[in-house]
Image (tube, rainbow, N blue to C red):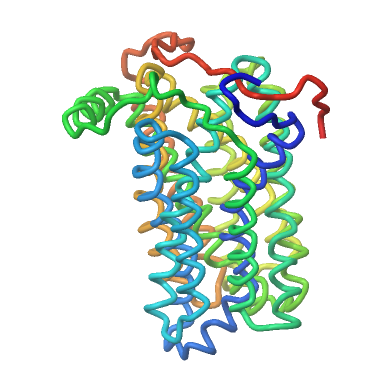
Amino acid sequence: MKRGQKTISFSEFVALIALTMALVAFAINMILPALQQIGKDLALGDPNDVQLIVSLLYLGLAIGQLLFGPLSDSIGRKPSMLFGLIVFATGCLISICAESFGVLLSGQLIQGIGLGAPRIVTVAIVRDNFVGREMARVMSFIMVVFIFVPTVSPALGQAIMFNASWTAIYALLLGLTLLMLIWFHLRLAESLPRSQRTALSLARLIKELRELCNSPRAIGYTVLSGLISSAFIAYLNLSQQIFQVQYQLGAQYPFYFAILSLGLGAASLLNGRIVLRFGMTRLTKWALFTSGGVSTIFCCVAYLFLGHPPFWMLMLVMMILLFCFGILVGNLNALAMEPLGHIAGIGAAFVGSLSTFISVPVAILIGKCYDNSVLPLIVGFAICSAFSLVVFYWVNGKKRRPLEVINNSPHRPTEISISSDSKVP
């Protein structure tokens, strides 16, 4: 190992990065089974207000991505990650001690800001240390964890609710964060050398943002990603009310949520196998038409059932819609980043933040319309898909650059301190 850095095996590196990224999914999904109880304990007048717990977390995440993207390029990956984890832990403490809904929401917002580090900096660390097929290999292992976590985290939250209060969920998140803090500090070396860091400069930031805004493709696909994510966040906001309250599934809610999460994960895996054959643009168009068509037809069906269609029918339609979302989310992010290779750092932060700033208000609006009927959610999918198709055709009607854009970034991957006897987990 060079420069006196610690040696970390490939298996440990993947486990550390994957679990750190998984904090995002744990924070979002583990609290879902507790939403109804939180509403009762904090005496909310409107049961739909409890949806803000998820929405404020996403809003904080949008802010955090804008903060930690440039910060990690300036002060380094490791200090930025440690700072982000401390911010997230602070948000967990506020949520544990919250005695009013306003305080709880402030805790959620701070948690989301802190999660900007696991969301952005982990990808930068992987990019620093690996290129090409090796980077794809690492990200594929990480994606396995990302698919697994949403399927088990609601069940874990449900198990905690059976034996303790909802504050114990935040306590578990706090404990996991402290573990990641210690692990990160002791085992992972800094991956961005001082010679490759860029000073925080408002003028430089404005220059790069202006360049980004002059790219219709980047802006268009970012807006499209925000519209599609609106319906998905609305689904997260409403899933507990629809499954546990409207369909009276009770403790079975995490099981059905896991089934739908596996469908989304399967779409992500399938997309990785077929995207080279069919291309991102074609797959995006197919998924948008499928999502729009299925949701529009189901709007009519749900209306005939007065907003309460048979549960098996709802599960089938949601499986299709979330499968389409799984196809869309990776392709839209890649298409938005396609023209931004030379400003990838701020580009990734901007794309992630702007799409979230678009999706959160729309998701809140959809959730506020819930009245013990699935119609607001399904109509939300239909309208978001329709507007997305309009944006899609607008973007592809513009004069465009070739699909393969060369990354002109001067930053080259640095060497990772991986021991030679590394094994894949």
Q: Position of residue 250 (x, y in %)?
A: 73, 78
In the rendered image, is residue 407 in sight?
A: yes
Q: Pick the residue in front: 212 or 384.
A: 212
Q: Quadrant of residue 420?
A: top right
* Residue at image point 54% right, 29% down: 331
* Residue at image point 41% right, 62% down: 110
* Residue at image point 45% right, 56% down: 58
Residue found at the very far left of the displayed protein: 203
Q: Pick the residue in front: 204 or 184.
A: 184
In the rendered image, is residue 385 in sight?
A: no
Q: Pick the residue in front: 128 or 393.
A: 128
Q: Is residue 368 left or right of residue 179?
A: left
Q: Pick the residue in front: 176 or 254.
A: 176
Q: Quadrant of the C terminus?
A: top right
Q: Position of residue 17 (x, y in %)?
A: 63, 39
Q: Position of residue 157 (x, y in %)?
A: 69, 70
Q: Quadrant of the N terminus?
A: top right
* Residue at image point 68% right, 37% down: 142
Please say if 408 is above or below 48: above
Residue found at the very far front of the displayed protein: 4
Please say if 279 is above or below 114: above
